Each structure stands twice: as structure tokens, then as C-alpha cells.
Image (tube, grey):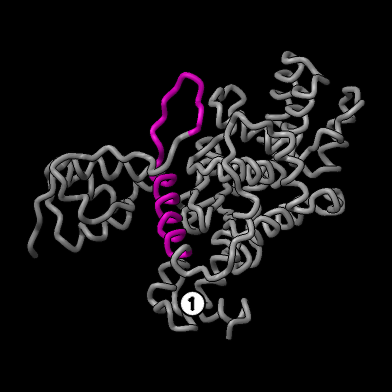
Amino acid sequence: MDTVIVKPEIIKWAIERSGLPESRLNSKSFQTYFKWINGEKTPTLKALEIFSKKVFIPFGYLFFDKPIVEKLPISDFRSFGNKVLKPSLNLIDIIQKWIVRQEWFSRNIRNENSWMKFSNNFSVEDDTADIAKSIRELLNLDSLNAKSFDDCSFRKQLSNSIEKLGILVVFSGTVDGNNSRPLDLNEFRGFSLYNEKTPLIFVNSKDSYKAQNFTIMHEFGHILLKQSGVTNSSPTNENKFELWCNKLAGQVLLPDFALKNKEFSEELIDTLSETYNVSKLVVISRMYFCKLISWHKYHELYENIKHEIKKYVQSKQKINGGNYYTTKTLSLSTSFVDAVLFSTISGDTTYHEAYSLLNVKENTFKQYLINRRFS
């Protein structure tokens, strides 16, 4: 069988680039790949094709003369203290996949997007208080009893209200449902992809539901600023855009009037968190900005609450199950899924392209048509 020449440093780079866990790297097949690196064996074309799929690398990359430096295709608003961390392959891939989907959606969407009537030339110089009040009115949050919803249902209510404006809202904790490619919560909480016609908000669903609500509104802030970028939740992030979006999100979810004439107590943190369906971190942040607590007290509370959340998130990640099609739809956005299905049965999109856009096979697609009542 004919073999092909690939530079050992490219094989090594492809493996390192994949970010695969050590358990996978110790498997029998990967031992063969390590022999390619040290020159004991030479790959066949077929073996190289299989290898490219296992390490999630475009086949053509394997014939480069040297490794390339891959960068995020959008702005990076994250902060890791004094550290500079390169983005993981999983993060780069999920952003790239949604750039492609967003472009398709922009070409095929037929509905008028009402969010554009609200959109203005906002900047970080604008006072967030009045904007937050307008957003609450736009999303009917003042008439919504957040306490009457469980955490998951309120997230759904919030995201549905935003999708009705013409903004895609996506929730996922993996790269296209591949559980071997989880999205690291420590790396990012969400990202925004702005274009005038079909802006998009992506939320890392590894987070708690209440924290996801904040991420939704934080990324909504970036959309108002007409920005595409990836974010995390560092209290030390001094980026002016992050500070503005954090402030806006906090005021939308926990309005000023909820804190007016209040005095700090541990009980008040719990009460506001439950009443407005926001995380305790959002509550103490708002308390600090409304001068109910000092900076020192804020950091003391932050450290305690952070440990509580970490335990919750870990327990949440152990829970499996749920309806496949419901989870799949959330990870693709209801508006996007329905647009692809409608476009396909209308003959505007080929079935092959639809399978690719939704990352499903034929049988799953057919069931999708039934579940979403397009049959």
C-alpha cells in the first residue's frame, strides 16, 4: 500500500492541537501515530485521513511545511489575570461553525427583525441605566414574575423573548454535541457574533442556569455595541467593553429599584437571587455598585459564592439524559432549526446542506421534521 510523506512535527502539532485527554493518547491507535513522529512507521493515505478526523484537523493542514498559529476569528475580551492563554481548538471550532451557520441564516431569513428598531449607535460612553430600563420593557421583564419560573424555564423565557427580536440564542456545552469535545467553562462563558441582520448570542451551557441568564444579557450588550467577541467572567477584567456589558446585564436582570432603600444582609442575597432568577454573584455585584457593600466585602462574598457555584456546576455536569431533540434544538437555536427545516422542504436548501448545517443524519433529520411539525 502506498505511503505518504508528512513531516513529523506536523503530526506532533496536530495531536497537541487536538487537546485530546491523555486516556485517548494512550490508546493503541495513537501509539501508531507516535511511531509516525519518531520515524518507525510511515502513514498510508487512508490512515492519514482517519488520523485527521480523530484529531479534528482539516486534511490539507497535514501537508503544511510547518505548524500554523491559529487565532480567534473574533475579538477576545477575556481576562486571565497576568496570563495569556491561547484559545483551544474546541473554542475556535465552535466559533467557526457558527460563523458559517450565521452566514447561511442571514442569506435565508425572511422575517423582519424587530431588534433593529431598538438598536442605536450605542457606545460605552452611554449610561447603562436608561438602556437597561428600555431592554426590560422590550423583553417584558417588568411584567414577568421571574420567581414563578424554575431556573431552566426562566432561561427559556428570556432566550425566547430575545429570539423573537430576530437574535439567535444558542446554548451548548460541547462542539456540536460531541461529548468528547467539551467547552471549558474556565476558558469562556459565551460569545457574540454581530451582523446587522442576524446577530447571534452563544452561551456555554456548562454554567448554572442563573449564570447563563447573565451571559445572555452580557452578550446582548455586545450586540448593542455591534461587536463580535468571546468573553469569560473575571472580576479583575478591566476591559471597558466588558465593564459596560457587565453593568448593563446586571441592571437588566436585577434593576435599580430592587435595591433601593435596602440594607445588606445574607438573607437579602438569597431573596434577590430567587426573586429575580439571577446568580448570587450578580446580586453581590449589584450590591457593590449600589453601595450596599464595600469592595472588601464584595471579594469576601465572591470567594465564598464561587466555591458554591463550582460544586453546583460539577453536579450539574454529572446529570445526563433529557430529550435529544430538545437539547439539540437548544444547541442550534429554535429559530435556526426551523429556518433550515422550512428552507429544505421549500426546496431552497438541499438535504445534504441541511444535514451539514444541523449536524444530523438523514433519519434524525426526518424525525426533526415530525417533532417540529414540518411534516
Asked which quadrant contains residue 122, the reply is top right
Residue at figure coordinates x 40%, y 52% from the top left:
96
Residue at figure coordinates x 86%, y 52% from the top left:
143
Residue 168, position in %: x, y? 57, 57
Decide: is 177 above or below 350. above
Residue 33 belongs to magenta span = no
- Is 55 on the left-hand or right-hand side of 253? left
Read off the magenta span.
77-105
* SS at mark 1 in the image: helix
- Is 124 on the left-hand or right-hand side of 46? right
Crowdedness of circle 1 by 10 Å Cα count: few (<14), some, many (20+)?
A: some
Residue 130, position in %: x, y? 74, 37
Residue at figure coordinates x 38%, y 44% from the top left:
73
Three-letter residue code for mark 1: Ser
Relative depth, front residue between 241 and 205: 241
Relative depth, front residue between 197 and 267: 197
Q: Which residue is mark 1?
A: 343
Relative depth, front residue between 75 and 268: 75
Residue 84 belongs to magenta span = yes
Q: Is residue 353 visible?
A: yes
